[in-house]
Structure formats: C-alpha cells, structure tokens
Image (cartoon, helix red, strand yellow):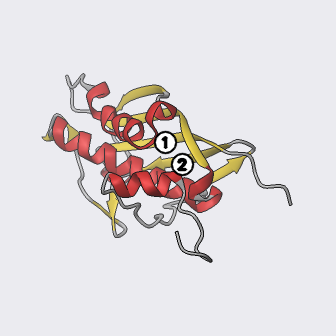
C-alpha cells in the first residue's frame, strides 16, 4: 500500500474478490429512509431488485417467475441492502448480518420460499463468512410494492463509532 492511500476495508476487499459491485442506493418510493443506523445496528428498509432505478422483474414466483430467477433477484436485493447500509454507516463499519426477512410474491401453491431467500442468505455468507450467518424469516405474500417478485430487508451489525 502506498503512503497517503487509505487502507481498503475488509468488506471492500471481499466484494472485489467475489466480483461483486454495490449498486447505487435507490431513492425511496415513499416516506421512509433506505437505511437507519441505531447504535451497533443498521436497519435497511425492504429492497426490491432494481437496476438503474428500474425494477428488473415483475410478477409472482411460481407464475411467470421461476425459483432460479427469484433466487437471483434475492441476491440483487441483498447487494442493494449492503449499499444502503454503506450509505449510513460506511463500508468499513459493516461487520455482519443479524436478521434477514424475505418477502416472496407467491403464486398459489408455491411453497419454496426458503429457496428464494437463500439467494440473499448465501450472498451474505459468501461476503461475511460466519459473521454473515443470521436469523431469518421467509414470508409468502400475494403482492409486493411495484409488483416485485421479491423484497428483502436486513438488520446489519456495525462496529462501534469512532470517538469524536
């Protein structure tokens, strides 16, 4: 490392090793904040799978959206959640995942909800190792905002703030 250059955070290095790039934080679609820091936690509002502010897919899983597609969308939501946490706490401060809640817009009879939310969970394990292992809920719903197939919200653990 050359003098004058800040050290890269462990999270930055790990994302690069995995070939992952955090997206821009999407603007809220209502009256809320994308993420809020409180003490040693960052709570991220539900993230839907966006690319450049546009929903990547619409519909219900099991009716037009496959399990494999929904899994990939869940991963996209997890990356968006990381970006939102970074925006309020800084990438170097995000040290692990406490809880994930995955909402899946499910067609009648679709019961593979855990397989959809595994996309987010497995991404967090890849990024954080054991610190990415978390409590989780997978909830089937009739519809989600913007007709998204998946929505993920996350509670991250962050390091203590630097003393001012």
Which residue is depicted at the point 34% across and 33% down?
117
Q: SS for tag 1?
A: strand
Q: Is residue 34 in view from this perspective?
A: no
Q: SS for tag 2?
A: strand
- Residue 45 lies, in percent from the top left, at 54, 48
Residue 153, label in figure: 1
Q: Residues within 10 Å of mark 1 (few under 14, many from 20)?
A: many
Front residue of this view, candidates 47 and 8: 8
Horizontal arrangement in the rendering, residue 57 relative to residue 129 (left or right)? left
Residue 45, label in figure: 2
Which residue is depicted at the point 46% across and 64% down?
26
Looking at the image, residue 56 lies above or below residue 119: below
Front residue of this view, candidates 89 and 49: 89
- Residue 32 lies, in percent from the top left, at 60, 56
Q: Residue furthest right?
A: 164
Which residue is depicted at the point 71% across and 42% down?
40
Q: Disc 1 to disc 2, how far (Cα)?
A: 5 Å
């Amino acid at each position: 490392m050359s003098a004058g250059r800040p050290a890269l955070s462990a999270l930055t290095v790990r994302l690069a090793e995995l070939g992952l790039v955090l997206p821009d934080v999407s603007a809220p679609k209502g009256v809320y904040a994308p993420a809020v820091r409180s003490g040693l936690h960052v709570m991220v509002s539900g993230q839907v799978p966006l690319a450049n502010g546009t929903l990547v897919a619409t519909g219900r899983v099991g009716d037009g959206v496959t399990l494999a597609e929904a899994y990939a969308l869940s991963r996209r939501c997890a990356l968006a959640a990381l970006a939102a946490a970074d925006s309020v706490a800084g990438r170097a401060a995000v040290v692990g995942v406490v809880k994930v809640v995955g909402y899946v817009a499910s067609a009648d009879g679709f019961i593979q909800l855990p397989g959809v939310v595994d996309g987010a969970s497995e991404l967090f394990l890849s990024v954080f190792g054991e610190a990415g292992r978390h409590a989780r809920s997978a909830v089937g719903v009739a519809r989600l905002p913007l007709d998204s197939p998946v929505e993920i919200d996350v509670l991250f653990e962050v390091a203590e703030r630097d003393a001012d």
